Image (spheres, rainbow, N blue to C red):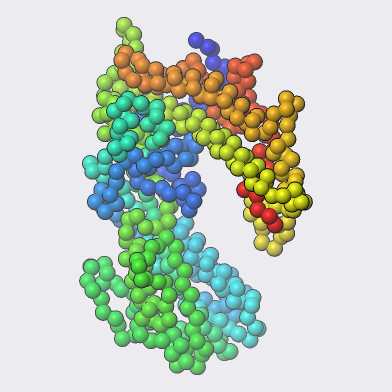
Amino acid sequence: ARTMKIGNVLLVIATIVRTDPVRSSIGDSRVISSDRVTSKDVTPAIGRGYSVDTGNILATCLNVNMLTDVTQTSFDYDYTWSEINSSNKTGVDAATTSVSSRGSTGRGWLRSSSWVRNQVEQDYYTSSTDTHYQYVVTVMKMDKYHISGDESRMDITTAARTVLEQLNIVAFFKSCGPNYMRSIRRSSEVVASFRYHSISGRSESTSSSIISSTFNSVNYSLWSGKTSTSSSNTSVELAQTASNSHEETVVLRIAAFGVTLRSGQALIARDFGEYKNVMDAAFVSMTHPAVGDVVSVEIMPWVANINFQVALTLDNPIRTGPDDNTPAFMRRFNLIVNAEHVARMDDIVQKRTQMIGKVSKCIRRLNFYPRDFNSRKLKSNAECTPGETCDSSMTIGILKAALVAVDDNDTYLVDRMARRLNEYVRNYFAPCMSDMAEVVSGVSAGGMQTKHWSDMTHCQEMSCVFPSVDWVAASRTCRATTVETGTTLVESYCYPVLQ
Protein backbone atom coordinates (compact mmCIF):
# COMPACT_ATOMS: atom_id res chain seq x y z
CA ALA A 1 0.00 0.00 0.00
CA ARG A 2 1.12 3.53 -0.69
CA THR A 3 2.26 5.75 2.16
CA MET A 4 0.23 8.94 2.30
CA LYS A 5 2.02 12.25 2.33
CA ILE A 6 1.59 14.52 5.36
CA GLY A 7 -0.20 17.04 3.17
CA ASN A 8 -2.74 14.42 2.16
CA VAL A 9 -3.26 13.41 5.77
CA LEU A 10 -4.06 17.00 6.69
CA LEU A 11 -6.44 17.28 3.78
CA VAL A 12 -8.18 14.10 4.85
CA ILE A 13 -8.56 15.46 8.38
CA ALA A 14 -9.94 18.72 7.01
CA THR A 15 -12.43 16.82 4.87
CA ILE A 16 -13.57 14.70 7.80
CA VAL A 17 -14.07 17.76 9.98
CA ARG A 18 -15.89 19.65 7.25
CA THR A 19 -18.36 16.92 6.39
CA ASP A 20 -18.83 15.95 10.03
CA PRO A 21 -19.55 12.26 9.31
CA VAL A 22 -19.53 11.14 12.94
CA ARG A 23 -22.57 13.24 13.73
CA SER A 24 -24.29 12.29 10.47
CA SER A 25 -23.58 8.63 11.06
CA ILE A 26 -25.94 8.60 14.02
CA GLY A 27 -28.68 10.32 12.02
CA ASP A 28 -28.05 14.01 12.69
CA SER A 29 -29.27 16.43 10.07
CA ARG A 30 -27.82 19.73 8.98
CA VAL A 31 -29.35 22.92 7.61
CA ILE A 32 -28.21 24.49 4.33
CA SER A 33 -29.12 28.13 3.74
CA SER A 34 -26.56 29.22 1.16
CA ASP A 35 -27.18 30.41 -2.40
CA ARG A 36 -26.79 26.78 -3.44
CA VAL A 37 -30.38 26.10 -2.38
CA THR A 38 -31.97 29.58 -2.26
CA SER A 39 -31.17 30.49 -5.87
CA LYS A 40 -34.21 30.69 -8.12
CA ASP A 41 -32.26 28.82 -10.78
CA VAL A 42 -32.55 25.54 -8.86
CA THR A 43 -35.56 23.60 -7.59
CA PRO A 44 -35.14 22.14 -4.11
CA ALA A 45 -37.78 19.59 -3.15
CA ILE A 46 -38.29 17.16 -0.31
CA GLY A 47 -36.83 13.85 -1.41
CA ARG A 48 -34.22 15.27 -3.79
CA GLY A 49 -30.57 14.32 -3.38
CA TYR A 50 -27.94 16.80 -2.27
CA SER A 51 -24.14 16.86 -1.96
CA VAL A 52 -22.60 19.08 0.71
CA ASP A 53 -19.17 19.24 -0.93
CA THR A 54 -20.32 20.15 -4.43
CA GLY A 55 -23.58 21.93 -3.61
CA ASN A 56 -25.32 19.99 -6.38
CA ILE A 57 -29.01 19.17 -6.18
CA LEU A 58 -29.54 15.72 -7.63
CA ALA A 59 -32.37 13.38 -8.60
CA THR A 60 -35.59 12.93 -6.64
CA CYS A 61 -35.27 9.49 -5.06
CA LEU A 62 -38.11 9.60 -2.53
CA ASN A 63 -41.82 9.63 -3.33
CA VAL A 64 -43.42 12.51 -1.41
CA ASN A 65 -46.99 13.76 -1.65
CA MET A 66 -46.89 17.35 -0.35
CA LEU A 67 -50.47 17.12 0.90
CA THR A 68 -50.39 13.75 2.68
CA ASP A 69 -46.73 12.81 3.26
CA VAL A 70 -45.48 15.88 5.15
CA THR A 71 -45.74 16.83 8.79
CA GLN A 72 -47.99 19.59 10.06
CA THR A 73 -46.58 22.92 8.90
CA SER A 74 -45.99 25.78 11.35
CA PHE A 75 -46.48 29.41 10.35
CA ASP A 76 -45.27 32.81 11.51
CA TYR A 77 -47.68 35.42 10.15
CA ASP A 78 -47.32 39.21 10.05
CA TYR A 79 -49.59 41.91 8.68
CA THR A 80 -48.21 45.38 9.30
CA TRP A 81 -48.61 48.92 8.00
CA SER A 82 -46.36 51.96 7.97
CA GLU A 83 -46.66 55.61 6.97
CA ILE A 84 -43.86 57.23 5.00
CA ASN A 85 -43.32 60.89 4.15
CA SER A 86 -41.01 61.48 1.18
CA SER A 87 -41.19 65.26 1.20
CA ASN A 88 -37.62 65.32 2.51
CA LYS A 89 -34.50 63.13 2.32
CA THR A 90 -35.00 61.94 5.89
CA GLY A 91 -38.30 60.40 4.90
CA VAL A 92 -36.69 58.52 2.03
CA ASP A 93 -33.93 57.16 4.27
CA ALA A 94 -36.53 56.01 6.78
CA ALA A 95 -38.51 54.06 4.19
CA THR A 96 -36.59 50.81 4.57
CA THR A 97 -36.35 51.02 8.36
CA SER A 98 -40.01 51.86 8.70
CA VAL A 99 -41.13 48.78 6.81
CA SER A 100 -38.64 46.23 8.12
CA SER A 101 -38.84 47.27 11.78
CA ARG A 102 -42.60 46.69 11.93
CA GLY A 103 -42.38 43.02 11.07
CA SER A 104 -40.28 39.99 11.83
CA THR A 105 -36.54 40.12 11.33
CA GLY A 106 -36.04 37.44 8.69
CA ARG A 107 -33.97 37.79 5.54
CA GLY A 108 -37.17 37.91 3.52
CA TRP A 109 -38.08 41.33 4.84
CA LEU A 110 -35.20 42.78 2.86
CA ARG A 111 -37.24 42.16 -0.29
CA SER A 112 -40.23 44.22 0.86
CA SER A 113 -38.17 47.00 2.38
CA SER A 114 -35.93 47.21 -0.68
CA TRP A 115 -38.93 47.35 -3.00
CA VAL A 116 -40.57 50.11 -0.96
CA ARG A 117 -37.38 52.12 -0.79
CA ASN A 118 -36.95 51.92 -4.57
CA GLN A 119 -40.51 53.15 -5.08
CA VAL A 120 -40.10 56.04 -2.67
CA GLU A 121 -36.72 57.06 -4.04
CA GLN A 122 -38.01 57.02 -7.60
CA ASP A 123 -40.91 59.30 -6.69
CA TYR A 124 -38.69 61.59 -4.61
CA TYR A 125 -36.08 62.19 -7.29
CA THR A 126 -38.52 62.52 -10.21
CA SER A 127 -41.19 64.72 -8.60
CA SER A 128 -41.35 68.52 -8.49
CA THR A 129 -40.17 70.37 -5.40
CA ASP A 130 -43.69 71.41 -4.37
CA THR A 131 -45.06 67.85 -4.46
CA HIS A 132 -45.31 66.08 -1.11
CA TYR A 133 -45.84 62.35 -1.58
CA GLN A 134 -47.27 60.38 1.30
CA TYR A 135 -47.42 56.60 1.57
CA VAL A 136 -49.29 53.99 3.51
CA VAL A 137 -47.43 50.69 3.11
CA THR A 138 -48.87 47.31 4.09
CA VAL A 139 -46.83 44.12 4.27
CA MET A 140 -48.23 40.61 4.68
CA LYS A 141 -45.58 37.97 5.31
CA MET A 142 -45.66 34.31 6.16
CA ASP A 143 -42.69 32.22 7.30
CA LYS A 144 -43.33 28.46 6.94
CA TYR A 145 -41.22 25.88 8.69
CA HIS A 146 -41.40 22.27 9.95
CA ILE A 147 -42.37 21.34 6.36
CA SER A 148 -40.80 17.94 6.72
CA GLY A 149 -41.35 14.67 4.95
CA ASP A 150 -43.03 12.02 7.10
CA GLU A 151 -40.54 9.16 6.87
CA SER A 152 -43.22 6.65 7.81
CA ARG A 153 -44.96 7.53 4.54
CA MET A 154 -42.07 8.36 2.20
CA ASP A 155 -40.70 5.52 0.12
CA ILE A 156 -37.73 5.23 -2.22
CA THR A 157 -38.74 5.71 -5.87
CA THR A 158 -39.07 2.67 -8.08
CA ALA A 159 -36.03 3.55 -10.20
CA ALA A 160 -33.81 4.19 -7.16
CA ARG A 161 -35.02 1.02 -5.45
CA THR A 162 -34.20 -0.99 -8.56
CA VAL A 163 -30.62 0.31 -8.42
CA LEU A 164 -30.36 -0.69 -4.75
CA GLU A 165 -31.84 -4.13 -5.40
CA GLN A 166 -29.13 -4.63 -8.01
CA LEU A 167 -26.66 -3.70 -5.24
CA ASN A 168 -25.21 -0.93 -7.39
CA ILE A 169 -24.64 1.41 -4.46
CA VAL A 170 -22.09 3.59 -6.24
CA ALA A 171 -24.61 4.32 -9.02
CA PHE A 172 -27.25 5.11 -6.37
CA PHE A 173 -25.04 7.76 -4.76
CA LYS A 174 -24.12 9.21 -8.17
CA SER A 175 -27.81 9.75 -8.96
CA CYS A 176 -29.34 10.40 -5.53
CA GLY A 177 -26.39 12.08 -3.80
CA PRO A 178 -24.92 11.35 -0.37
CA ASN A 179 -27.89 13.07 1.34
CA TYR A 180 -31.54 13.84 0.69
CA MET A 181 -33.67 16.86 1.54
CA ARG A 182 -35.99 16.10 4.43
CA SER A 183 -37.54 19.50 5.09
CA ILE A 184 -37.69 22.95 3.51
CA ARG A 185 -38.32 26.34 5.10
CA ARG A 186 -40.13 28.84 2.88
CA SER A 187 -41.30 32.44 3.08
CA SER A 188 -43.82 34.51 1.14
CA GLU A 189 -44.61 38.23 1.10
CA VAL A 190 -47.05 40.65 -0.43
CA VAL A 191 -46.36 44.38 -0.12
CA ALA A 192 -48.70 47.17 -1.18
CA SER A 193 -47.91 50.87 -1.41
CA PHE A 194 -50.73 53.43 -1.39
CA ARG A 195 -49.32 56.74 -2.65
CA TYR A 196 -51.07 60.09 -2.55
CA HIS A 197 -49.77 63.65 -2.58
CA SER A 198 -50.79 67.13 -1.69
CA ILE A 199 -49.43 70.65 -1.79
CA SER A 200 -49.94 71.15 1.92
CA GLY A 201 -48.21 67.98 3.16
CA ARG A 202 -49.66 65.04 5.06
CA SER A 203 -53.42 64.58 4.84
CA GLU A 204 -54.85 63.11 8.04
CA SER A 205 -58.18 62.24 6.43
CA THR A 206 -56.67 60.41 3.44
CA SER A 207 -54.20 58.54 5.60
CA SER A 208 -56.85 57.46 8.09
CA SER A 209 -59.21 56.37 5.31
CA ILE A 210 -56.55 54.22 3.66
CA ILE A 211 -55.42 52.64 6.92
CA SER A 212 -58.99 51.86 7.94
CA SER A 213 -59.83 50.36 4.56
CA THR A 214 -56.71 48.22 4.36
CA PHE A 215 -57.31 46.73 7.79
CA ASN A 216 -60.96 46.04 6.98
CA SER A 217 -59.78 44.27 3.81
CA VAL A 218 -57.86 41.54 5.64
CA ASN A 219 -59.84 38.31 5.69
CA TYR A 220 -59.09 37.06 9.19
CA SER A 221 -61.87 34.44 9.01
CA LEU A 222 -59.73 32.40 6.61
CA TRP A 223 -57.94 31.08 9.69
CA SER A 224 -61.08 29.16 10.67
CA GLY A 225 -61.96 28.16 7.12
CA LYS A 226 -65.23 30.16 7.16
CA THR A 227 -66.55 32.14 4.21
CA SER A 228 -66.07 35.85 4.79
CA THR A 229 -68.37 38.70 3.89
CA SER A 230 -67.15 42.03 2.61
CA SER A 231 -67.18 44.88 5.08
CA SER A 232 -68.86 48.14 4.18
CA ASN A 233 -65.54 49.88 3.71
CA THR A 234 -63.94 47.48 1.22
CA SER A 235 -65.78 48.89 -1.79
CA VAL A 236 -64.45 52.42 -1.37
CA GLU A 237 -62.87 53.53 -4.65
CA LEU A 238 -59.24 54.64 -4.47
CA ALA A 239 -60.06 57.76 -6.42
CA GLN A 240 -62.98 58.50 -4.09
CA THR A 241 -60.74 58.15 -1.05
CA ALA A 242 -58.49 60.83 -2.43
CA SER A 243 -61.21 63.17 -3.73
CA ASN A 244 -62.97 63.19 -0.37
CA SER A 245 -59.84 64.75 1.05
CA HIS A 246 -59.27 67.15 -1.85
CA GLU A 247 -56.29 65.09 -2.98
CA GLU A 248 -55.37 63.57 -6.32
CA THR A 249 -56.04 59.92 -7.09
CA VAL A 250 -54.35 57.41 -4.84
CA VAL A 251 -51.81 55.23 -6.68
CA LEU A 252 -51.67 51.60 -5.54
CA ARG A 253 -48.64 49.42 -6.28
CA ILE A 254 -48.46 45.75 -5.31
CA ALA A 255 -45.50 43.38 -5.31
CA ALA A 256 -45.47 39.69 -4.35
CA PHE A 257 -42.60 37.38 -3.48
CA GLY A 258 -42.95 33.61 -3.30
CA VAL A 259 -46.68 33.19 -4.06
CA THR A 260 -48.68 31.32 -6.68
CA LEU A 261 -51.99 32.20 -8.28
CA ARG A 262 -54.85 30.00 -9.38
CA SER A 263 -56.50 30.37 -12.76
CA GLY A 264 -58.41 33.65 -12.97
CA GLN A 265 -56.61 35.29 -10.06
CA ALA A 266 -54.47 38.41 -10.44
CA LEU A 267 -52.59 40.77 -8.15
CA ILE A 268 -54.41 43.79 -9.59
CA ALA A 269 -56.60 46.11 -7.51
CA ARG A 270 -58.57 49.20 -8.57
CA ASP A 271 -60.46 49.66 -5.33
CA PHE A 272 -60.35 48.36 -1.79
CA GLY A 273 -62.71 45.53 -2.63
CA GLU A 274 -60.23 44.23 -5.18
CA TYR A 275 -57.38 44.88 -2.73
CA LYS A 276 -59.19 42.59 -0.30
CA ASN A 277 -59.46 39.90 -2.99
CA VAL A 278 -55.73 40.20 -3.71
CA MET A 279 -54.83 39.77 -0.04
CA ASP A 280 -57.26 36.85 0.35
CA ALA A 281 -55.82 35.04 -2.69
CA ALA A 282 -52.26 35.70 -1.51
CA PHE A 283 -53.03 34.45 1.99
CA VAL A 284 -54.50 31.17 0.72
CA SER A 285 -51.49 30.73 -1.57
CA MET A 286 -49.05 31.34 1.29
CA THR A 287 -50.55 28.60 3.45
CA HIS A 288 -49.65 25.85 0.97
CA PRO A 289 -46.51 24.06 2.20
CA ALA A 290 -44.99 23.83 -1.30
CA VAL A 291 -45.35 27.54 -2.07
CA GLY A 292 -42.78 30.19 -1.21
CA ASP A 293 -39.18 31.19 -1.73
CA VAL A 294 -36.73 28.72 -0.21
CA VAL A 295 -34.99 30.06 2.90
CA SER A 296 -33.17 26.88 3.93
CA VAL A 297 -33.30 23.10 3.59
CA GLU A 298 -32.61 20.34 6.09
CA ILE A 299 -30.64 17.41 4.69
CA MET A 300 -30.18 13.90 6.03
CA PRO A 301 -27.58 11.28 5.05
CA TRP A 302 -29.07 8.32 3.21
CA VAL A 303 -27.63 5.97 5.81
CA ALA A 304 -30.12 7.47 8.30
CA ASN A 305 -33.08 6.52 6.10
CA ILE A 306 -34.76 3.37 7.37
CA ASN A 307 -35.65 2.08 3.87
CA PHE A 308 -32.04 2.51 2.75
CA GLN A 309 -30.79 0.69 5.85
CA VAL A 310 -33.12 -2.24 5.21
CA ALA A 311 -32.13 -2.47 1.54
CA LEU A 312 -28.43 -2.72 2.46
CA THR A 313 -28.86 -4.58 5.79
CA LEU A 314 -26.65 -1.95 7.39
CA ASP A 315 -27.18 -3.36 10.88
CA ASN A 316 -24.88 -6.28 10.12
CA PRO A 317 -21.06 -6.16 10.33
CA ILE A 318 -18.88 -7.13 7.35
CA ARG A 319 -16.14 -9.71 7.94
CA THR A 320 -12.85 -8.44 6.50
CA GLY A 321 -10.53 -11.16 7.85
CA PRO A 322 -10.34 -14.26 10.03
CA ASP A 323 -10.39 -12.21 13.21
CA ASP A 324 -11.52 -8.82 11.93
CA ASN A 325 -14.73 -7.20 10.79
CA THR A 326 -16.22 -3.77 10.06
CA PRO A 327 -19.00 -2.99 12.56
CA ALA A 328 -22.30 -1.46 11.47
CA PHE A 329 -21.50 2.06 12.69
CA MET A 330 -18.24 2.09 10.70
CA ARG A 331 -20.13 0.94 7.59
CA ARG A 332 -22.35 4.02 7.93
CA PHE A 333 -19.38 6.29 8.59
CA ASN A 334 -17.53 5.04 5.52
CA LEU A 335 -20.59 5.30 3.30
CA ILE A 336 -21.09 8.96 4.24
CA VAL A 337 -17.55 10.15 3.52
CA ASN A 338 -17.10 7.92 0.47
CA ALA A 339 -20.43 9.03 -1.03
CA GLU A 340 -19.22 12.65 -0.89
CA HIS A 341 -15.97 11.58 -2.57
CA VAL A 342 -17.98 9.94 -5.35
CA ALA A 343 -19.99 13.17 -5.69
CA ARG A 344 -16.81 15.25 -6.01
CA MET A 345 -15.34 13.00 -8.72
CA ASP A 346 -18.62 12.82 -10.62
CA ASP A 347 -18.99 16.61 -10.46
CA ILE A 348 -15.58 17.07 -12.10
CA VAL A 349 -16.39 14.63 -14.89
CA GLN A 350 -19.85 16.11 -15.51
CA LYS A 351 -18.62 19.71 -15.66
CA ARG A 352 -15.76 18.87 -18.02
CA THR A 353 -18.09 16.92 -20.28
CA GLN A 354 -20.49 19.86 -20.37
CA MET A 355 -17.65 22.25 -21.20
CA ILE A 356 -16.52 20.10 -24.14
CA GLY A 357 -20.08 20.17 -25.46
CA LYS A 358 -20.27 23.92 -24.98
CA VAL A 359 -17.04 24.50 -26.93
CA SER A 360 -18.25 22.28 -29.77
CA LYS A 361 -21.60 24.08 -30.00
CA CYS A 362 -19.89 27.46 -29.89
CA ILE A 363 -17.57 26.55 -32.76
CA ARG A 364 -20.50 25.29 -34.84
CA ARG A 365 -22.36 28.54 -34.24
CA LEU A 366 -19.34 30.66 -35.15
CA ASN A 367 -18.88 28.70 -38.37
CA PHE A 368 -22.48 29.51 -39.24
CA TYR A 369 -21.57 33.19 -39.75
CA PRO A 370 -20.10 34.15 -43.16
CA ARG A 371 -16.51 35.34 -43.33
CA ASP A 372 -17.49 39.02 -43.74
CA PHE A 373 -18.98 38.82 -40.21
CA ASN A 374 -15.55 38.24 -38.62
CA SER A 375 -15.26 41.87 -37.53
CA ARG A 376 -18.69 41.95 -35.87
CA LYS A 377 -18.54 42.37 -32.08
CA LEU A 378 -20.06 39.95 -29.59
CA LYS A 379 -21.95 40.57 -26.36
CA SER A 380 -20.34 39.45 -23.13
CA ASN A 381 -22.18 37.08 -20.78
CA ALA A 382 -20.96 39.12 -17.81
CA GLU A 383 -23.56 41.28 -16.13
CA CYS A 384 -23.13 44.97 -16.76
CA THR A 385 -23.17 47.52 -13.95
CA PRO A 386 -26.03 50.01 -14.50
CA GLY A 387 -24.70 53.24 -15.99
CA GLU A 388 -21.49 51.67 -17.33
CA THR A 389 -20.64 50.87 -20.92
CA CYS A 390 -20.97 47.16 -21.66
CA ASP A 391 -19.40 47.14 -25.10
CA SER A 392 -16.94 44.35 -25.77
CA SER A 393 -13.95 44.27 -28.12
CA MET A 394 -14.39 40.56 -28.80
CA THR A 395 -15.25 39.75 -32.40
CA ILE A 396 -16.41 36.63 -34.20
CA GLY A 397 -13.04 36.30 -35.89
CA ILE A 398 -11.00 36.57 -32.68
CA LEU A 399 -13.16 34.07 -30.80
CA LYS A 400 -13.16 31.61 -33.68
CA ALA A 401 -9.36 31.81 -33.94
CA ALA A 402 -8.99 31.16 -30.20
CA LEU A 403 -11.32 28.13 -30.19
CA VAL A 404 -9.86 26.41 -33.24
CA ALA A 405 -6.23 27.32 -32.58
CA VAL A 406 -3.85 24.37 -32.50
CA ASP A 407 -1.00 23.72 -30.08
CA ASP A 408 2.49 22.46 -30.85
CA ASN A 409 1.06 18.99 -31.48
CA ASP A 410 -1.50 20.30 -34.01
CA THR A 411 -4.49 19.50 -31.79
CA TYR A 412 -7.55 21.68 -31.36
CA LEU A 413 -8.82 22.98 -28.02
CA VAL A 414 -11.76 20.57 -27.94
CA ASP A 415 -9.43 17.65 -28.69
CA ARG A 416 -7.08 18.64 -25.87
CA MET A 417 -10.00 18.95 -23.45
CA ALA A 418 -11.32 15.52 -24.43
CA ARG A 419 -7.88 13.93 -24.08
CA ARG A 420 -7.37 15.39 -20.60
CA LEU A 421 -10.80 14.21 -19.48
CA ASN A 422 -10.10 10.73 -20.83
CA GLU A 423 -6.76 10.59 -18.97
CA TYR A 424 -8.48 11.62 -15.74
CA VAL A 425 -11.28 9.07 -16.11
CA ARG A 426 -9.00 6.20 -17.13
CA ASN A 427 -6.32 6.76 -14.47
CA TYR A 428 -8.24 8.07 -11.44
CA PHE A 429 -12.02 8.15 -11.76
CA ALA A 430 -12.56 4.59 -13.03
CA PRO A 431 -9.98 2.87 -10.76
CA CYS A 432 -11.31 4.70 -7.70
CA MET A 433 -14.88 3.72 -8.59
CA SER A 434 -13.71 0.13 -8.89
CA ASP A 435 -12.20 0.30 -5.41
CA MET A 436 -15.52 1.63 -4.10
CA ALA A 437 -17.50 -1.12 -5.82
CA GLU A 438 -15.22 -3.95 -4.70
CA VAL A 439 -17.03 -7.00 -3.31
CA VAL A 440 -15.93 -7.79 0.26
CA SER A 441 -17.05 -11.05 1.90
CA GLY A 442 -19.90 -11.32 -0.59
CA VAL A 443 -21.11 -7.76 0.09
CA SER A 444 -21.49 -5.64 -3.06
CA ALA A 445 -19.72 -2.26 -2.84
CA GLY A 446 -18.08 -3.58 0.31
CA GLY A 447 -15.02 -1.48 -0.54
CA MET A 448 -16.80 1.79 0.20
CA GLN A 449 -18.35 0.29 3.35
CA THR A 450 -15.18 -1.14 4.89
CA LYS A 451 -12.61 1.52 3.96
CA HIS A 452 -12.27 5.28 3.99
CA TRP A 453 -11.42 6.59 0.51
CA SER A 454 -8.02 7.74 1.82
CA ASP A 455 -7.18 4.05 2.47
CA MET A 456 -8.11 2.91 -1.03
CA THR A 457 -5.19 2.40 -3.40
CA HIS A 458 -6.69 4.28 -6.34
CA CYS A 459 -8.63 6.95 -4.42
CA GLN A 460 -6.18 8.33 -1.88
CA GLU A 461 -4.74 11.08 -4.09
CA MET A 462 -6.73 14.02 -2.70
CA SER A 463 -5.46 16.46 -5.31
CA CYS A 464 -7.49 14.61 -7.95
CA VAL A 465 -10.76 16.02 -6.61
CA PHE A 466 -9.60 19.63 -6.77
CA PRO A 467 -10.96 21.78 -9.61
CA SER A 468 -8.78 22.50 -12.65
CA VAL A 469 -6.44 19.55 -12.27
CA ASP A 470 -5.21 17.04 -14.85
CA TRP A 471 -3.78 13.57 -14.52
CA VAL A 472 0.02 13.59 -14.90
CA ALA A 473 1.23 10.24 -16.19
CA ALA A 474 4.86 10.79 -15.23
CA SER A 475 4.14 11.22 -11.52
CA ARG A 476 0.94 9.11 -11.45
CA THR A 477 -0.92 11.88 -9.70
CA CYS A 478 -2.99 15.00 -10.42
CA ARG A 479 -1.60 18.51 -10.71
CA ALA A 480 -3.14 21.93 -11.24
CA THR A 481 -2.93 23.15 -14.83
CA THR A 482 -3.15 26.57 -16.41
CA VAL A 483 -6.61 27.33 -17.73
CA GLU A 484 -6.44 27.84 -21.48
CA THR A 485 -7.52 31.18 -22.90
CA GLY A 486 -10.07 29.50 -25.12
CA THR A 487 -11.87 27.98 -22.11
CA THR A 488 -12.13 31.40 -20.44
CA LEU A 489 -13.51 32.94 -23.63
CA VAL A 490 -16.16 30.23 -23.85
CA GLU A 491 -17.48 31.21 -20.43
CA SER A 492 -17.59 34.89 -21.45
CA TYR A 493 -18.88 34.77 -25.04
CA CYS A 494 -20.60 31.48 -25.79
CA TYR A 495 -23.30 30.98 -26.92
CA PRO A 496 -22.24 33.86 -29.29
CA VAL A 497 -24.67 36.79 -29.60
CA LEU A 498 -23.97 39.79 -31.81
CA GLN A 499 -23.95 43.27 -30.31
- Percent across and percent down for residue 190 are 42, 67
The correct choice, above or below, for 223 with respect to 493 in the image is below
Residue 280 falls in image quadrant: bottom left
Quadrant of the rendering where the C terminus is positioned: bottom right
Q: Nearer the viewer, residue 145 or 82?
A: 145
Q: Residue at x 29, y 72 (%)?
A: 220
Q: In the image, is residue 400 above or below residue 473?
A: below
Residue at image location 53% in from the left, 25% down from the top: 425
- Where 395 sits versus 141, above or below? above
Judged left or right of residue 19, residue 484 is right
Q: What residue appears at the point 47 percent right and 69 percent down from the top-left corner?
A: 255
Residue 322 x, y percent position in the rendering: 31, 6
Q: Is residue 7 left or right of residue 285?
A: right
* Above or below: residue 293 compared with residue 221: above
Give the side of residue 364 with respect to residue 270, left or right. right
Residue 496 in picture, x, y percent from top left: 65, 49
Q: Residue at point 63% right, 80% down?
A: 127
Query: Is residue 90 at least partly visible in the picture?
Result: no
